[in-house]
């Protein structure tokens, strides 16, 4: 028997990179680590989208603006766009906060954690009926810092997998 499950309320948890399970996310973390080359994190210039191959569809690239006053979406992978019903490349996080406060403020918290600590983190969770407009019910993500050697985080590389609404799950 097949069931379609959707929680009433959204929930999520911060996890270590070692607890990530989705193959594209794990591949993204491995690629990011290879680019570190002994540094704390790679530079934005090290990220060459064509070298991501099929993984590029799972990538979001975010630029830090004004020391974290805002964030700008520079690239949104094609496999993620349907989950949000739009390609929000070129938009700012402040615009998302204005239109979807709960979602946007949650993203701001995660982005600020990675930006200020310079440490990567994993995040996964369920998207409930309370998140109007989201076309996915589950997500797993790696939020990975980028920036100049010895400097502050100036970009975030996010590798994500989403499970669309209406996806059958074993009952």
Image (cartoon, rainbow, N blue to C red):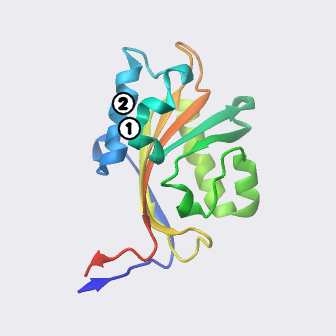
- Are the two marked residues, 2 and 1, in contact with CB atoms closer than 8 angstroms? yes
- In the foreground, 142 or 90: 90
* Residue picked out by circle 1: 28
Q: Is residue 16 above or below residue 164?
A: above
At x 36%, y 27%, the residue is 33
Q: Residues within 10 Å of mark 1 (few under 14, many from 20)?
A: many
At x 69%, y 40%, the residue is 72
- Mark count: 2
- Image coordinates of residue 105 in percent, x first then y, are 65, 54
* Residue picked out by circle 2: 31
Secondary element type, mark 1 = helix
At x 29%, y 51%, the residue is 21
At x 40%, y 42%, the residue is 55
- In the foreground, 153 or 161: 161
Q: CA distance from mark 2 to mark 1?
A: 5 Å
- Image coordinates of residue 85 in percent, x first then y, are 61, 64
- In the foreground, 152 or 146: 146
Task: Give the position of the N terminus as an image quadrant.
Answer: bottom left
- Image coordinates of residue 18 in percent, x first then y, are 28, 41
Q: Residues within 10 Å of mark 2 (few under 14, many from 20)?
A: some
**Quadrant assignment, res 152:** top right
Secondary element type, mark 2 = helix
Task: Give the position of the C terminus as an image quadrant.
Answer: bottom left
**Quadrant assignment, res 126:** bottom left
Left or right of 19, for residue 139: right
- Image coordinates of residue 131 in percent, x first then y, are 59, 70
């Amino acid at each position: 028997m097949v069931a379609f499950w959707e929680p009433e309320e959204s929930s999520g948890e911060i996890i270590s990179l070692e607890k990530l399970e989705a193959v594209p996310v794990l591949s993204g973390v491995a690629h990011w680590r290879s680019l570190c080359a002994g540094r704390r994190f790679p530079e934005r210039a090290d990220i060459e989208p064509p070298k991501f191959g099929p993984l590029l569809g799972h990538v979001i690239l975010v630029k830090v603006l004004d020391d974290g006053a805002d964030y700008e979406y520079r690239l949104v992978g094609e496999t993620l766009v349907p989950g949000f019903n739009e390609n929000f490349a070129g938009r700012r996080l402040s615009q998302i906060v204005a239109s979807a406060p709960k979602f946007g403020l949650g993203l701001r918290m995660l982005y600020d954690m990675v930006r200020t600590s310079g440490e990567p983190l994993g995040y996964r969770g369920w998207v409930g009926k309370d998140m109007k407009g989201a076309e996915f019910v589950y997500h797993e993500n790696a939020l990975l810092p980028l920036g100049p050697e010895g400097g502050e985080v100036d970009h975030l590389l996010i590798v994500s997998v989403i499970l669309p609404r209406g996806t059958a799950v074993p009952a």
